[in-house]
Image (cartoon, rainbow, N blue to C red):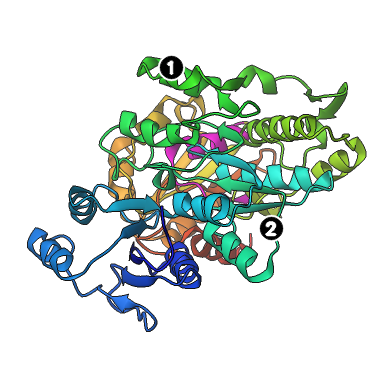
């Protein structure tokens, strides 16, 4: 692929990743055409084609008849099954994901070869990405988080071009959107954490969603490459008869039994006890197991010694990511927990499991992703009326109907006020309570992103008084 002095069409150019990729293309002396659904964005340096209606095939054909593109780069949020992508591919114009293109520029054009750890899954990707990079740094290894968490990979490439600085290890969070079609991306360590229903507003079926995620597994292999994968994912792969994906790569399987001991076993006969982990819960135990296996493989591969003291000190101080089962405030026997990063039912179930020995007042809702909330009815904590649910936002009526609830709320503030009012009225000083925000939905009906949603919840909590 010749990428200098070529014409590129960037689909979804207005977001963080889209902005990054256009800036990278600019450094490579290319002619850049851009498109974004947000018609109000200005692209003064590039040829803006956002005035076209890309949901109309005649407009798409008019655009492609009047402009000549050598390649199209697609940002993660832009759907690959859209009419414009189908028409581009029909005309033999390569449509390349930002992740894939950035990898190509780094490895093939610039001939730089950092060690790549790629992480995907439905839940826990960001925490595991951060944990993995943090553990590597505890061993004095220059590692940085990027991809869907941290900087886009294209920003890492830009930084190298401008400053000639490149970390030894890139720990890359990969969403299914970024993995949908790859030509070049070839990680040294691939992690597949888990899988559950998600993005079914984008994928036709669970099978299609799984197929996108499976692109985390390299299509061509190097001897040292490994796949770290959850047993539950392996079971689903076998169910859909995709097991040939696992045959050509060394595989380490993680299962739920691995977290039931009092400690995690680390190579060189070292132990780390769960009681010393500040964010100890089922979800984070699994995340840590994956991170430790990746660290071990890297140290063995590079023949590096293991500094247990730094490892231990790092983990005992680790507080996790904001808005991921994050303890915000304790008011007498009421704990407030912010899990705004939860956008799936699976992540909601993990949050509930972390506090199933308490009485939970749950705030759930937002923009529906075509997920099934009825599974909550099967939980013992729900049957025993120790899980009280306050649905809000555009998904609130659906959640109310699926769970046979009597009330729903327009927004989070209404739900929070109702939950805390009822908690005050029914509070028993001898019992423990949790007010848990774990939306299991996208935030975009009322907030820009999960961070803004989390900040709003925190403000409500800080203003709460008994």
| Residue 92 in sight in this render | yes
Q: Which one is in front, 451 or 164?
A: 164
- The image shows a total of numbered marks equal to 2
Instruction: Tell me which segment is drawn in magenta.
Output: 336-356
SS class, disc 2? loop
Q: In this figure, which residue is indicated by the disc labeled 2?
A: 166
Q: Earlier in the sequence, mark 1 or mark 2?
A: 2
Q: Position of residue 84 (x, y in %)?
A: 21, 56
Q: Quadrant of residue 54?
A: bottom left
- Residue extending furthest toward the left: 58
Q: Which label number is shown at residue 243?
A: 1
Picture residue at 39% right of the left edge, 20% below the top? 242
C-alpha span from label 1 to label 2: 36 Å
Task: Answer whether residue 393 is magenta in the image.
Answer: no
SS class, disc 1? helix
| Residue 317 in sight in this render | no
């Amino acid at each position: 692929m010749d990428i200098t002095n070529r014409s590129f069409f960037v689909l979804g150019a207005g977001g963080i990743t889209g902005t990054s990729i256009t800036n990278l293309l600019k450094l490579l002396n290319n002619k850049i055409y851009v498109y974004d659904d947000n018609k109000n964005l200005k692209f003064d340096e590039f040829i803006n084609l956002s005035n076209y209606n890309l949901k109309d095939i005649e407009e798409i054909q008019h655009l492609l008849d009047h402009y000549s593109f050598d390649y199209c780069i697609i940002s993660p949020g832009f759907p690959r099954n859209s009419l414009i992508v189908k028409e581009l591919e029909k005309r033999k114009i390569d449509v390349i994901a930002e992740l894939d293109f950035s990898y190509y520029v780094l490895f093939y054009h610039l001939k730089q070869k950092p060690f790549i750890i790629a992480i995907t899954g439905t839940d826990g990707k960001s925490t595991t990405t951060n944990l993995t990079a943090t553990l590597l740094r505890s061993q004095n290894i220059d590692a940085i988080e990027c991809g869907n968490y941290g900087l886009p990979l294209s920003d890492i490439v830009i930084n190298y071009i401008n400053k000639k600085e490149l970390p030894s290890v890139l720990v890359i969070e990969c969403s299914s959107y970024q993995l949908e079609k790859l030509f070049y991306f070839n990680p040294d360590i691939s992690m597949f954490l888990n899988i559950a229903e998600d993005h079914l507003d984008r994928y036709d079926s669970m099978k299609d969603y799984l197929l996108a995620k499976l692109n985390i597994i390299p299509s061509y292999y190097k001897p040292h490459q490994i796949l770290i994968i959850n047993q539950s994912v392996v079971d689903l792969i076998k169910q859909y008869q995709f097991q040939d994906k696992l045959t050509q790569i060394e595989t380490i399987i993680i299962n739920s039994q691995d977290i039931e001991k009092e400690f995690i076993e680390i190579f060189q006969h070292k132990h780390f006890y769960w009681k010393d982990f500040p964010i100890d819960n089922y979800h984070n135990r699994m995340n840590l197991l994956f991170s430790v296996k990746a660290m071990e493989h890297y140290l063995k591969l590079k023949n590096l010694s293991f500094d247990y003291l730094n490892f231990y000190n790092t983990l005992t101080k680790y507080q996790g990511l904001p808005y991921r089962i994050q303890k915000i405030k304790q008011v007498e026997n009421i704990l407030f927990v912010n899990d705004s990063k939860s956008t799936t039912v699976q992540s909601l179930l993990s949050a509930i499991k972390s506090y199933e020995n308490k009485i939970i007042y749950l705030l759930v809702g937002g923009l529906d992703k075509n997920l099934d909330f009825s599974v909550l009815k099967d939980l013992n904590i729900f049957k025993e009326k120790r899980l009280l649910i306050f649905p809000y936002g555009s998904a609130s009526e659906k959640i109310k109907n699926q769970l046979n609830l009597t009330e729903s709320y327009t927004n989070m503030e209404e739900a929070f006020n109702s939950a805390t009012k009822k908690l005050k009225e029914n509070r028993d000083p001898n019992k423990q309570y949790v007010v848990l925000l774990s939306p299991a939905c996208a935030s975009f009906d009322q907030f820009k992103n999960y961070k803004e949603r989390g900040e709003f919840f925190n403000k409500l909590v800080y203003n709460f008084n008994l």
